[in-house]
């Protein structure tokens, strides 16, 4: 019976407490009815997006290079040239023809091998008779007294340094160690005596020139060079049995002109 009375009182007092709380809230907040149920707006207020400005965008093209890219067009080069070599002393100049081939280790440095051939020949004649033929043509009767030939072969191992390929006129300079062989032969037609000898030895060459690029991978080249070598051979005197050393100097200056190309 007692438990029922307490429960009944709690049921009656609960609405009364709610009503008193509403009255107190209305007294503190003017304009709000004491019996009005407060409404709470749970909708989130919109958030204003911050003002955003974008600077001007600039794009710079970048060059892509494959791994192992090299600026020069080819790594292997060849050259064929012709010119002359004029030895120091009374000897006359001789015609020269040569070839060089090498590898470019970078844009401006080249290593390779080469060979030149300098040829010089001549003969001595004696005029026996000179007459005038029909039409006033000059007729000469001669006899060959002697003839000779000289062939020099310098074999080169060279280093060459040149300017950048994009220049209109590309300067270059080179140096080579060489092994040279000189073949001399002569014949006296009167006495029948002959002379044949081979002289060999070490020497060097140095040159400087310029190249004019052509279309594609070829260039016109022109250079001035210096050749230096003292070549020799051992000769035995049959009368005394002694051995002598004969030497021939091939020192001189010359010029070479040709075509250089890569592949």
Image: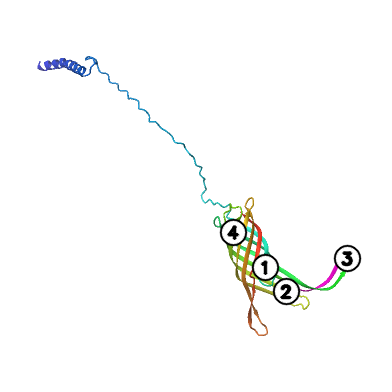
Q: Is residue 128 above or below residue 96?
A: below
Crowd tier of the residue under label 1, counting other residues whose Cα lies within 10 Å: few below 14, some 14–19, many 20 or above: many
| Residue 106 point in image, percent of width and height | 54, 56
* Secondary structure that dominates the magenta span: strand
Q: Is residue 79 above or below residue 147?
A: above
Q: Report the front residue among 179 and 2.
A: 179
Indicate the quadrant containing the N terminus: top left, top right, bottom left or bottom right.
Answer: top left
Range of magenta residues: 134-146
Dot placed on the residue nearer the N-terminal end, 1 or 3: 1
Give the spatial CA distance, label 3 vs label 4: 55 Å
Q: Circle 2 — which element? A: strand
For residue 186, the mark is 2
Dot placed on the residue nearer the N-terminal end, 4 or 2: 4
Disc 1: which residue: 86
Q: Residue at x 71, y 76 (%)?
A: 195
Crowd tier of the residue under label 3, counting other residues whose Cα lies within 10 Å: few below 14, some 14–19, many 20 or above: few
Crowd tier of the residue under label 2, counting other residues whose Cα lies within 10 Å: few below 14, some 14–19, many 20 or above: some
**Which-is-in-front pick, marks 4 and 2?**
4
Q: Is residue 225 found left or right of 194 in the rendered image?
A: left
Crowd tier of the residue under label 4, counting other residues whose Cα lies within 10 Å: few below 14, some 14–19, many 20 or above: many
Q: Circle 4 — which element? A: strand
Indicate the quadrant where residue 15 lies.
Answer: top left
Indicate the quadrant where residue 97 lies.
Answer: bottom right
Give the spatial CA distance, label 4 vs label 2: 39 Å
**Which-is-in-front pick, marks 1 and 2?**
1
Q: Is residue 144 magenta?
A: yes
Q: Report the front residue among 25 and 103.
A: 25
Dot placed on the residue nearer the N-terminal end, 4 or 1: 1
Dot placed on the residue nearer the N-terminal end, 2 or 3: 3
């Amino acid at each position: 019976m007692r438990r029922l009375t307490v429960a009944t009182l709690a049921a009656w007092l609960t609405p009364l407490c709610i009503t008193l709380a509403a009255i107190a809230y209305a007294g503190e907040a003017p304009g709000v009815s004491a019996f009005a149920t407060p409404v709470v707006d749970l909708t989130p207020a919109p958030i204003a997006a911050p003002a955003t400005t974008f600077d001007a965008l600039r794009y710079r093209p970048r060059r892509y290079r494959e791994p192992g890219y090299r600026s020069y067009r080819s790594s292997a080069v060849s050259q064929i040239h012709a010119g002359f070599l004029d030895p120091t002393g009374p000897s006359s100049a001789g015609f020269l023809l040569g070839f060089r081939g090498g590898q470019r280790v970078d844009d401006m440095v080249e290593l390779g091998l080469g060979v030149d051939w300098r040829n010089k020949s001549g003969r001595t004649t004696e005029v026996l008779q000179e007459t005038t033929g029909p039409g006033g043509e000059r007729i000469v009767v001669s006899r060959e007294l002697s003839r000779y030939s000289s062939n020099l072969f310098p074999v080169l191992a060279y280093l060459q340094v040149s300017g950048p390929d994009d220049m209109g006129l590309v300067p270059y300079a080179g140096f080579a160690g060489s092994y040279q062989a000189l073949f001399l032969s002569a014949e006296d037609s009167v006495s029948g005596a002959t002379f044949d000898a081979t002289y060999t030895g070490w020497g060097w060459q140095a040159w400087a020139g310029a190249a004019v690029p052509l279309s594609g991978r070829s260039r016109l080249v022109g250079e001035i060079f210096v050749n230096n070598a003292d070549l020799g051979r051992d000769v035995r005197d049959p009368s005394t049995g002694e051995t002598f050393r004969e030497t021939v100097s091939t020192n001189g200056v010359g010029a070479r002109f040709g075509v250089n190309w890569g592949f």
